[in-house]
Image (spheres, grey):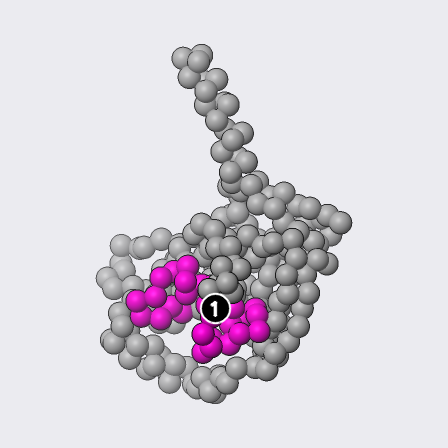
Amino acid sequence: MGLEMEAVAAAAPAAAREQGVEIYPLSRYYFGAKDAAAAPRGLETAADRALRLKANFAANGLRTSVHGVLLVELFDHPHVLLLQVRNSSFVLPGGRLRPGEEDVQGLKRKLSSKLSVLDDGEAIAEEEEDDWQVGECIGMWWRSEFEAIPFPYMPPSFRAPKECIKLFLIRLPMSRQFVVPRNMKLLAVPLSQIHNNAQVYGPVISGIPNLLSKFSLNVISD
């Protein structure tokens, strides 16, 4: 028993190191802007959006969305990079997968379209895709209806979920450039501010601090 306990204790620090995440200062990153992508859907009504989502579901089945959790350091505290749309709602970088598209491939495409000089419709070079270090999936959420609040589990009442939302941890390099559409803002929001703050950030974003609790966050300051 004693030897087994010693083996477990020795393995624990190694496992913790494997789960370590290095977070670099916000000052090491560069920010630019690009033309806003055409967004005719921004003018659609809620009823029109519901009809479009129903048509997509009938044609392609379950909608899968992938989003990246990007962490930076500011004031010796971890911050999450969020996109603010029209000075109102907050979203994680990412978006909907195309039919048959793999999670990691689709997330790299979406990150490049939201945070680099490329647009979603442009072909993404292999080296550009590989520039994003997509880590493990840290959480999954399910939506029962097209406009319903997502759940971090599949309730028994769900007969045919309409959307699956996946969060992936993105390991940022020491420095890089972010280029954001002009109709969006890229903000660094402290974990302490979003924790359990679903009223402002919604249930998915406000649950990120809990999802990150299993990682050892190594905050690196200048």
Camera-side residue: 158 or 117?
117
Q: Is residue 98 magenta?
A: yes
* Residue 183 image-quadrant placement: bottom right
Report the span colored magenta: 96-125
Q: Quadrant of the N terminus?
A: top left
* Residue 7 image-quadrant placement: top left
For the point 53% across and 47% down, the residue is 212
* Residue 161 image-quadrant placement: bottom left
Q: Is residue 188 above or below residue 21?
A: below
Q: Is residue 33 visible?
A: yes
For the point 49% across and 59% down, the residue is 130
For the point 73% across and 52% down, the residue is 75
Query: Residue 138 appears at what percent x and percent y?
Result: 45, 50
Q: Is residue 150 visible?
A: no
Camera-side residue: 99 or 80?
99
Camera-side residue: 128 or 206?
128
Query: Residue 25 appears at what percent x and percent y?
Result: 69, 53
Q: Is residue 110 left or right of residue 197?
A: left
For the point 60% across and 61% down, the residue is 81
Query: Residue 146 appears at what percent x and percent y?
Result: 35, 71
Q: Is residue 190 above or below residue 110?
A: above
Q: Is residue 174 left or right of residue 60?
A: right
Residue highlighted by disc 1: 125
Q: Is residue 211 above or below residue 70?
A: above
Q: Is residue 150 above or below residue 45?
A: above
Question: What amino acid is labelled 1 in the image?
Answer: Ala
Q: Is residue 157 magenta?
A: no
Name the outermost residue toward the right. 222
